[in-house]
Amino acid sequence: MRNVQKLLFIFTLCLALSCMGSAEGLIRVFGYEGRDVKVPCPYNPGYESYEKYLCKDNCDYPDILITTTEKNKTRFFIYDDKSTRIFTTTISNLQSTDARGYWCGVSRNGKDIYTEVKLETRKDSCCNTVNTIQHIEGGSAAITCPYDSESVRKLKYICRGNQPSKCLHQAMITSNSPQKGRFKLVDDGQSRKFTVTISDLNLNDSGSYLCGVQSNSGLDVFSATVLKVKEWCCVKYETVRGTVGLSVTLQCPYQPDQRNNRKFLCKGSDRSSCKDMIMGQSRFRVLNVSSHSFWVTINKLEEGDSGTYWCRSDLDWNIGKYTQFHLSVEKEEQDAGKKKNLKEPRQPATLAYPHKSSTVKPINTATPAASNDLIKGLPDVALFSLSAVLPVLLLLLLKIILVHVFKNKCNKVKDTEIIANCYKLDFADAPDVWGGEDVYQNDDAIVMRAKQGTMKQENASYRFDNVYGNEADYENVTENEDIYCNEEFHKALRK
């Protein structure tokens, strides 16, 4: 009796186990919360036309989540690919409560065929540790991504954002295609890290990045980096002037923690490719290094030294650790002091003397500068006109005065018959006169002779040195002083 009961128990147990079917391996599935996850279920040949389903727990009728005859049900979708003999169930909007065990089932007469599924979920964000780097706009940034020794031959990639579920699909570059635009990926298997370099940085490159390493079983492995790109507005800028042959000193501040670093001065418009001027340049010297700045002196300046310089104390171009200089070298001016004292020459005025039927041509006023020159030239024009007319007036006035003076002198001089008659005297015929005879005793004779002289002789010639002279000059008449008796001279004067 006991043997019968024992056999009945074993039969019942075997019957119960046969309802669950046989488990062929274990399928592990990983998914991110809020995202979709696909559960692949392979099956053996010959079952292409059979119904398939996904169930949980004991796989009783209430435990069946979806079948191939239903296609779509709430958060579940199923698709049977008969060519590959894999049916796939997609679970959308994955929740943490979805992490559990499932069964892939194939319906058949008798007992069904089952394959066990283990689903794990993770939050769709990364990561607990985030590396932050800072770079300048226009430069380049290197993002370093470490991995373990088991991932040396696996696919590497990088994407923007912090959602691992989308990273591979939105990857900017992978180890299979290591060069793309501004991005370059270099994988160093010996040091077990790959580096992604981004060149020509701009403000839009700021943000979160994920380095991913693909996993054949389970979720991919990620590391997170935050890149901050700063504008060039924060560069310290100075303008320096120098003279050929002399020296100039540049002061370069730096951070206290950079005191022991080598100090740099390079030349070039682009700081990323400028030429180091300290190494191999005897005219460039680093002097007076203090706790907060150092000085670079450039000796024997040349015109070719003009340009843009950068001084820094760090291998990386970090903000606040470099200064930009614009150096202008010029030749020394000769006689600079004399040039300062020289006045700007006046522009000569254009003069025009009008006639009856003509007008004075105006100075060119095509530009405002010409108008200014015209205004400045007006006093010169008046002065020039006055200087041109004044001599004429003076000569005319002088002529009138001289004629009047000479007329009076001719009337007053009665000392000698020579002057009265305005004729040249033969001194041999007039001994009595020069002998001291009183000429005034012959007043009647002198007056008579004077009347006989023509009126033309009253306008006798004059000498310019006698215009304002006294009458004593006429007492010293010699043989050569015949201007008063020179009739030709008088004719010329009358003309």
Image (cartoon, grey):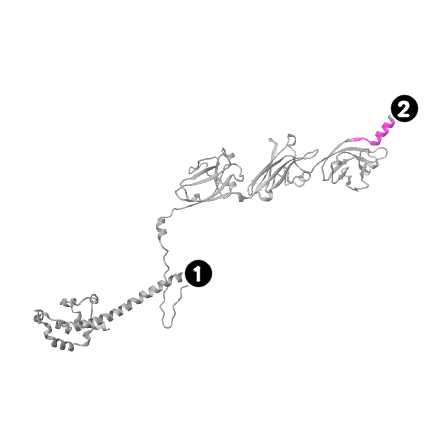
Q: Badge 1: how crowded within 10 Å, few (<14), some, or many (20+)?
A: few
User: Type of residue at label 1?
Assistant: Pro
Residue 231 left/right relative to 283: right
Which mark is drawn over residue 5?
Answer: 2
Q: Name the residue: 32% across, 66% down.
A: 386
Q: Quadrant of the N terminus?
A: top right
User: Type of residue at label 2?
Assistant: Gln
Secondary structure state at the residue bearing disc 1: helix
Q: Quadrant of residue 424?
A: bottom left
Residue designated by label 1: 368
Q: From what the image shows, is residue 445 above or below residue 67?
A: below
Q: CA distance from mark 2 to mark 1?
A: 129 Å
Magenta span dominant secondary structure:
helix
Residue 267 or 317: which is nearer the viewer? 317
Q: Quadrant of the C terminus?
A: bottom left
Secondary structure state at the residue bearing disc 2: helix
Residue 258 left/right relative to 354: right
Q: Which residues are magenta?
A: 11-23
Q: Quadrant of residue 217?
A: top right
Q: From where the camera sits, is residue 420 visible?
A: yes
Q: Earlier in the sequence, mark 2 or mark 1?
A: 2
Is residue 219 inside the magenta stretch?
A: no
